[in-house]
Image (cartoon, helix red, strand yellow):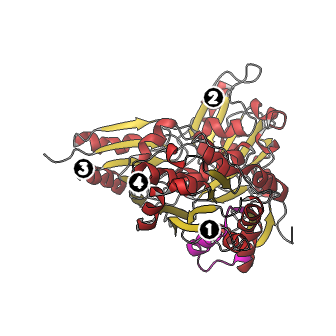
Amino acid sequence: MSKQGKVWLVGAGPGDVGLFTIKGKDILAKAEVVVYDSLVGDGVLTMVPENAEKINVGKRAGHHTMKQENINKVLLEKAQEGKRVVRLKGGDPFLFGRGGEELELLCEHKIPYEVVPGVTSCIAVPAYNGIPVTHRDFSSSVHVITGHKRAGERYNIDFEALVRTKGTLVFLMGITAMEDICKGLLEAGMDPETPAAVLQQGTIAGQKRVVATVNTLKQASNAAKIQTPAIIVVGQVCQVADTFGWYEKLPLAGYKVLVTRPKELVSGMAKKLREQGAEVLELPAIGVKPVEDRTNLSRVFEKLDTYQWIAFTSPSGVRIFFELLMEAGKDIRALGQIKIAAIGRGTEKALKKHNLYPDLMPEVFDGASLGEKMAKECEPGAKILLARAAIGNKEVIEELAKREDLIVDDVAIYDTFYEDQDLIDEKGQFERGKIDCAVFTSASTVKGFVAATEGLDYTKVLAACIGKQTQEEALRYGMKTAVAKEASIDSLVELVIKLKGQISGSY
């Protein structure tokens, strides 16, 4: 029997990745084909599985990479191939998203499908701008209208009926027709002094709000150089925007940050930055995997009881060490009385997951400081296992070598490789000034970023670096750099907050 395909129409929300639903995220993670729009936020696009077939249909007001009829056929054809197909749409699939049209062909061919609603911009974007679409003092109804109309045609909108509702009016896709919309409302009898707002790129870093009146909105929008995507809100509720506005008060509101870390370590950093209001683009620059040749490691596992110390230089080293230890049929008891040295709070946190605490950790989180501290504190003749990346820096070894009586086994347990992705144009966003800052947690992540953005003018990159070695690597390419006070996530977040608004010079 052939495999039965299925289609999911998934609403991606208005842009902020935190507004993507749990169900949508779970379904996207299992997708074999993803058909996506231009309005899907970058944060959601980074969740698309690497091995999924990705089809950009580029739908945006007035600009379609693929006609709707062809999109419908693609969904059908991929499902008929037996694939799990996710149709990823900005906002909600059924609110001016033409989701109903896409289902018609699927129904005709008896293709199973599900619809996953998304947070719609007509509610979320006003909320992020301090505008409640209903309020008992101002409005008891809300009406959502498409502002899009075909070229040369008149609006099929009963403006008089809308004015009579005395409710909040939300026009989606109406920026190019703003003058016609306001004119229609005024001719239908709306008070020219009725508050109105245009809200640009709501819920993400490009968010901008202009509040005026129906009579002056077009002029105010032009003066503020409002860009699409944006929505228009008309009604008395707009007058409370400046009072209720909250997003712009967050420390990193309006700031877009690129986070580059090994894939499995990204979320903690991104979460803390988002809590401060940043739009975070998570694009791991490097990945790690256990070494293929484990001959040396197998010998080490058989004689763990002969070591007095084991040193870890990264959270990845801790994670992979214990994974390989389990694969070898051993557990934590194999460590016996061995003492543990570690670099950094992240490595310390990874050890605590195994109910272990480091006996030694330098105040400065780098290899040289670790080696120097171990050279001072290790007992005479101590045997040390250094479990780390195959491309680990030499500084820790050089410092330990100053003690001739120490025996050091430098064992590679994982390899580092550069990550690549094809959905987000990092280079283009930096060139257009769309990304304000890049966060680097190691020299390797700098190298991975450079590999992924070949040809970029790196003087356009403001780099927040976790330490001096990372800064030195960034400086090699001409990036503007700043260094965190200590090698920790919290310190890096503090640094990014400090850098906000500083676009040139030295730090």
From which residue to which does the magenta span run?
A: 437-459
The first of marks 1 and 3 along the sequence is: 3
Foreground pick, 397 / 266: 397
The residue under the point 80% across, 64% down is 483
Element at label 3: loop
State the image quarter where residue 394 is shown.
bottom right
Q: Real-space Cα distance between discs 4 and 3?
A: 15 Å
| Labelled pair 4, 1 in contact (Cβ < 8 Å) | no
Callout in the foreground (4, 3): 3
Is label 1 or label 3 in front? Answer: 1
The numbered mark, 4 or 1, whose residue comes first in the sequence reads: 4
Determine the image quadrant of residue 426. Answer: bottom right
Local crowd size for mark 4, using a 10 Å CA cut-off: few (<14), some (14–19), many (≥20): some
- Within 10 Å of disc 1 (Cα), the crowding (few <14, some 14-19, many 20+) is some
**Residue at the image position 38 percent from the left and 40 percent from the top:** 100
Q: Indicate the amino acid at tag 4.
A: Val
- Disc 3: CA contacts within 10 A as few (<14), some (14-19) or many (>=20): some
- In terms of secondary structure, where does tag 1 sit? strand
Q: Position of residue 235 (x, y in %)?
A: 73, 32
Q: Are marks 2 and 4 in contact (CB under 8 Å)?
A: no
Name the disc covering residue 58, or none: none
How many angstroms separate mark 2 from mark 3 (CA)?
A: 42 Å
In the figure, 89 relative to 243: above or below?
A: below
Task: Say what amino acid the circle numbered 3 marks.
Answer: Gly
Q: Which residue is mark 1?
A: 407
Q: Position of residue 187 (x, y in %)?
A: 69, 39
Q: Label 2's element?
A: strand
Residue located beneath label 2 in the image: 142
The amino acid at mark 2 is Val
